[in-house]
Image (cartoon, helix red, strand yellow):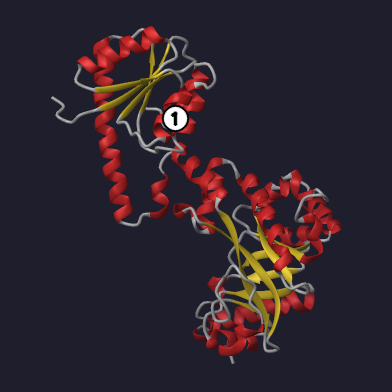
């Protein structure tokens, strides 16, 4: 026997159906409220009401059951939804499962079956709420994203709260700011770091959407940047297939001469067709191109020959502790010399945190450095003051 009071919301545009469902569930001991449309149901939730279970019709005027469940996940990540329909279809079933629907039942159904389904859903809802609290207590970060519906909701909020931080890239030992890397941030706590944000975009198939938003945010910030400094921005390989990137009228393209597109090899560039031609088109717009993660990424001979990068970034894993590793120092020296002297590519060493790392990299031939030793990423552009503590 269920001793826990279960609050149920019944959503159906047909008044006789709402009345019957409400009676069946109320007789089973549930506290039941009804709504005549998806919009009415969402208004209840936006007003602060919460339910243990929601049942909804699939086909309703104004908003389908699929759209309702998706909108619902913006407001409540956990509440189970039971779909009731007289006209089931495989496509709608798949879509609803993706967005976290609990069950998909065909009308008419036996009363006892519906009551049992609501009881099971309510029990699992309580478990889901407890699990989420436990994850929050353990600071589980990305694990809080849940299923696709929850991830979609978090990602939408993250896009709405994007902002750009800037970290200087410095010339050493001349102590001049060469440029700034634009690092995307979000005030959505579960997707606050670039890695979590890009992981979510990849899972949702929304990489290009994220790329467009990042470039728009960056374009809006460029007016505050020192006019002589280059601005570096990360570019996912799949962004190289986005039409917006090659549009001369796109916001960032208007400032292309100041921008270095830093190709982050989260996936192999071999998947991108006509890579050489795409790189040429970007250069025609005025962009420079950099290869990220030199030393650990997918980048090979083919990537370099097709992209013909202007700049390469030595990965932080090569930089960290380089002062205590003769093999790292020797390898870095060889890579820097090869890039600078034979390929005509400038090398930026990222992740420099100590003076010993800085000095070892300088001895290895590096003259462009980036890292916490000089400055942490910040919303404002920092200039000469960063050198006060790096002598």
Q: How many labels does the image show?
A: 1
Quadrant (top left, top right, bottom left, bottom right) of the C terminus: bottom right
Give the side of residue 307 with respect to residue 368, left or right. Answer: right
* Horizontal and vertical percent position of residue 46: 42, 35
Q: Can residue 94 be seen in this view?
A: no
Of residues 364 and 81, the one nearer the viewer is 81
Quadrant (top left, top right, bottom left, bottom right) of the N terminus: top left
Looking at the picture, does residue 163 appear above or below residue 202? below
Looking at the picture, does residue 221 appear above or below residue 272? below
Graded by Cα atoms within 10 Å as few (under 14), some (14 to 19) or many (20 or more), the crowding at tag 1 reads some
Q: Residue furthest front?
A: 47
Of residues 91 and 77, the one nearer the viewer is 77
- Residue drawn at 54 percent across, 41 percent down: 204
Q: Name the residue under label 1.
A: 42
Give the side of residue 169 with respect to residue 229, left or right. Answer: left
Of helix, strand and loop, which one carries label 1?
Answer: helix
Looking at the picture, does residue 357 appear above or below residue 270? below
Of residues 21 and 331, the one nearer the viewer is 21
Looking at the picture, does residue 193 appear above or below residue 374? above
* Horizontal and vertical percent position of residue 79: 35, 33
- Residue drawn at 45 percent across, 29 percent down: 69
* Horizontal and vertical percent position of residue 345: 76, 72
Of residues 58 and 13, the one nearer the viewer is 13
* Horizontal and vertical percent position of residue 67: 51, 27
């Amino acid at each position: 026997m269920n001793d826990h009071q279960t609050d149920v919301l019944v959503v159906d545009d047909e008044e006789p159906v709402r009345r019957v469902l409400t009676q069946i569930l109320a007789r089973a001991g549930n506290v039941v409220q009804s709504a005549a449309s998806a919009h009415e149901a969402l208004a209840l939730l936006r007003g602060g009401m919460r339910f243990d279970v929601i049942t909804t019709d699939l086909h309703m005027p104004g908003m389908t059951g699929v759209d309702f469940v998706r909108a619902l996940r913006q407001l409540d990540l956990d509440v189970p939804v039971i779909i009731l329909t007289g006209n089931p279809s495989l496509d709608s079933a798949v879509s609803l499962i993706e967005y976290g629907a609990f069950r998909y039942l065909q009308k008419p159904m036996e009363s006892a079956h519906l009551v049992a389904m609501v009881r099971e859903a309510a029990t699992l809802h309580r478990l889901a709420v407890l699990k989420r609290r436990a994850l929050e207590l353990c600071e589980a970060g990305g694990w809080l994203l849940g299923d696709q519906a929850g991830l979609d909701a978090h990602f939408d909020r993250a896009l709405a709260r994007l902002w750009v931080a800037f970290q200087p890239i410095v010339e050493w030992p001349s102590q001049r700011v060469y440029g700034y890397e634009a690092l995307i941030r979000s005030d959505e706590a579960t997707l606050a770091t670039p890695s979590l944000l890009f992981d979510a975009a990849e899972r949702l198939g929304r990489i290009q959407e994220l790329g467009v938003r990042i470039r728009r945010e960056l374009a809006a910030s460029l007016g505050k940047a020192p006019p002589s400094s280059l601005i570096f921005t990360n570019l996912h390989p799949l962004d190289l297939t986005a039409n917006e990137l090659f549009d001369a009228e796109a916001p960032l393209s208007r400032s292309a001469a100041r921008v270095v597109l830093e190709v982050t090899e989260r996936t192999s560039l071999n998947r991108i067709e006509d890579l050489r031609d795409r790189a040429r088109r970007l250069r025609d717009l005025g962009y420079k191109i950099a290869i990220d993660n030199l030393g650990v990424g997918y980048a090979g001979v083919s990537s370099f020959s097709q992209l013909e990068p202007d700049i390469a970034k030595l990965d932080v894993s090569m930089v960290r502790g380089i002062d205590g590793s003769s093999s790292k120092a020797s390898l870095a020296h060889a890579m820097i010399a090869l890039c600078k002297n034979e390929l005509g590519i400038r090398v930026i060493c990222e992740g420099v945190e100590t003076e010993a790392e800085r000095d070892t990299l300088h001895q290895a031939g590096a003259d462009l450095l980036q890292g916490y030793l000089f400055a942490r990423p910040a919303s404002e552009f920092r200039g000469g003051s960063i050198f006060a503590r790096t002598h």
